[in-house]
Image (cartoon, grey):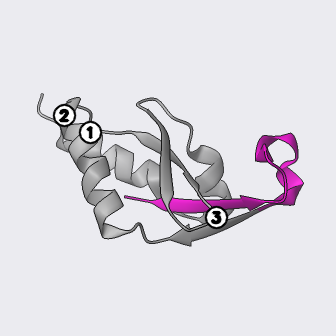
Amino acid sequence: MFCVRIESDLLDWRQDYDRIAYTVVDPPPRLADTAFAFLRALDLSFGAFDFAITRDGSHMFLECNPNGQWGWLEDATGIPVAAAIAELLLEAPR
């Protein structure tokens, strides 16, 4: 599991990518467990989850995209998502 916190002073950070800060973070254990349970329940091998963090620090689930974009996060942070997905595909039953 790879987690990247995206911080911006804009409500919709997609308006200006130059005003974004990326930080690789560890997921809270309960959130990670819940995300993996979600994937198992839907029989998915991959999901790009989006969460918002409220002012009190709670994580609010927004969506899980089973075809989500991640390449730009790998470019920005160096997290090895492509290698992990390739490994997952190589391990898949044929």
Q: Quadrant of residue 42?
A: top left
Few, some or many residues within 10 Å of mark 1 (<14, 14–19, 20+) = some
Q: Position of residue 39 (x, y in %)?
A: 26, 39
For marks 1 and 3, give the CA distance.
27 Å
User: Mark 3 near mark 2, Cβ–Cβ under 8 Å?
Assistant: no
Which mark's residue is nearer the viewer, 1 or 3? Answer: 3
For marks 2 and 1, give the CA distance.
5 Å
The residue range painted magenta reads 1-20
Label ID, residue 22: none
Q: Where is residue 48 in the image (x, y as percent from the top left)?
A: 46, 41
Few, some or many residues within 10 Å of mark 2 (<14, 14–19, 20+) = few
Q: What residue type is labelled 3?
A: Arg
Q: Element under label 1? A: helix
Image quadrant where one finds the N terminus:
bottom left
Q: Is residue 8 magenta?
A: yes
Q: Position of residue 49 (x, y in %)?
A: 46, 44
To which residue does mark 1 refer?
Answer: 39
Q: Element under label 2? A: helix
Q: What residue type is labelled 1?
A: Leu
To which residue does mark 3 refer?
Answer: 55
Image quadrant where one finds the C terminus:
top left
Sequence-first tag of 1 and 3: 1
Q: In which quarter of the image is residue 54?
A: bottom right
To which residue does mark 2 refer?
Answer: 41
User: Mark 2 near mark 1, Cβ–Cβ under 8 Å?
Assistant: yes
Rendered residue at 30%/68% (across/down): 29
Sequence-first tag of 3 and 2: 2
Q: Is residue 57 magenta?
A: no
Q: Front-most of 5 and 89?
A: 5
Q: In the image, 6: left or right of 43?
A: right
